[in-house]
Image: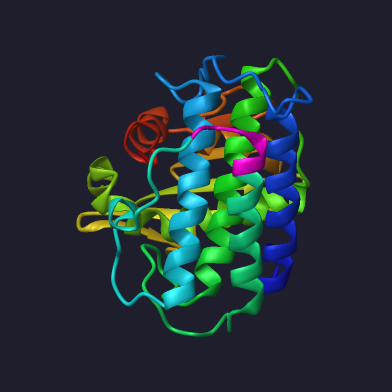
Amino acid sequence: MDHLEHCDLLAVEVERFAGLIDSGPDGSGPFEVPVATCPGWSIGDLTVHLGTVHRWAEHLVRVRAHERVPSSEMGLGEAQPTAEWLRVGGDVLVQTLRAADPDAPMWAWGADQRVRFWSRRQLHETLVHRIDVELALGLVPAASPAVAADAIDEFLVNLSGAAYFSSRVKDLRGDGERLSFQATDQGREWSVSLLPEGFEVGGPAGSPSATVAGPALALLLVLYRRLPLDEGGVLTTGERSLIELWWANSALE
């Protein structure tokens, strides 16, 4: 998927999220419902979080920031979670991303220090949080297997860069053991080697020490801890301790 495809899909996900919370003509929504997959948060809290992230990312892309700018310095103020507020921020983000050169250099917390990092990251951030709302409302989440596989790839490629806000990522290390993550409905596999200095995605070939395999969406939800291990058709084989090491330290916090 390229930058503009990510932009188009992000626009769809913004509207899906907004539609879930826009349950009345007055703009009211299920904002007090707790979100079990984001412990301690309600749907209102999650809406404010996502809308703030959209506005933060839009600012970074618009000014082509060359270093991280905290959202607290952007004068965003106190937000009231509504579907319209979420839509406005998401729509402006999509417009800014579509107008930007995807290859323009800028700061990003992940591996790709270009504008296109943000279209991909914001798509999958919004996708996962839309699923959070669906789970909170007792709905069955759905996503294209191809999009879910792209989200898995984006998660794994950028995870090492998350260490500055998810400190336990630094504990993903070992003595050369290899984990294999397999999206069985997409024919895709990601290899992760646990090394003394950290982990490496796309490490040496060979028999994995442990495997986590299942349909792309279920695998994505397991990796993001929206599903427990061994649920949704996801199967684990090999050294369970390695899978649990990964599980304990790879959360985006």
Quarter occupied by residue 153: bottom right
Q: Nearer the viewer, residue 161 or 56?
A: 56
84 is within the stretch colored magenta: yes
Question: In this figure, which colouring scheme has been used for the structure?
Answer: rainbow
| Point 51% across, 75% down: residue | 115
| Point 58% across, 84% down: residue | 101
| Point 61% across, 33% down: residue | 82
- Check the picture and name the quadrant holding the C terminus: top left
- Check the picture and name the quadrant holding the N terminus: bottom right
Horizontal side, residue 79 vs residue 4: left or right: left
Q: Is residue 174 depicted above or below 29 in this figure?
A: below
Q: Is residue 87 depicted above or below 246 in this figure?
A: below
> Where's residue 71, x and y in %?
34, 53
Q: How many marks?
A: 0
Q: Nearer the viewer, residue 250 or 55?
A: 55
| Point 53% across, 58% down: residue | 121
Q: Nearer the viewer, residue 88 or 230?
A: 88
126 is within the stretch colored magenta: no
> Where's residue 230, x and y in %?
58, 23
> Where's residue 184, x and y in %?
72, 44
Magenta range is 80-85
Q: Is residue 229 visible?
A: no
Q: Is residue 13 depicted above or below 202 in this figure?
A: above
Q: Is residue 131 visible?
A: yes
Q: Residue furthest left?
A: 197
> Where's residue 123, x and y in %?
62, 54
Q: Is residue 12 depicted above or below 17 in this figure?
A: below
Quarter occupied by residue 251: top left
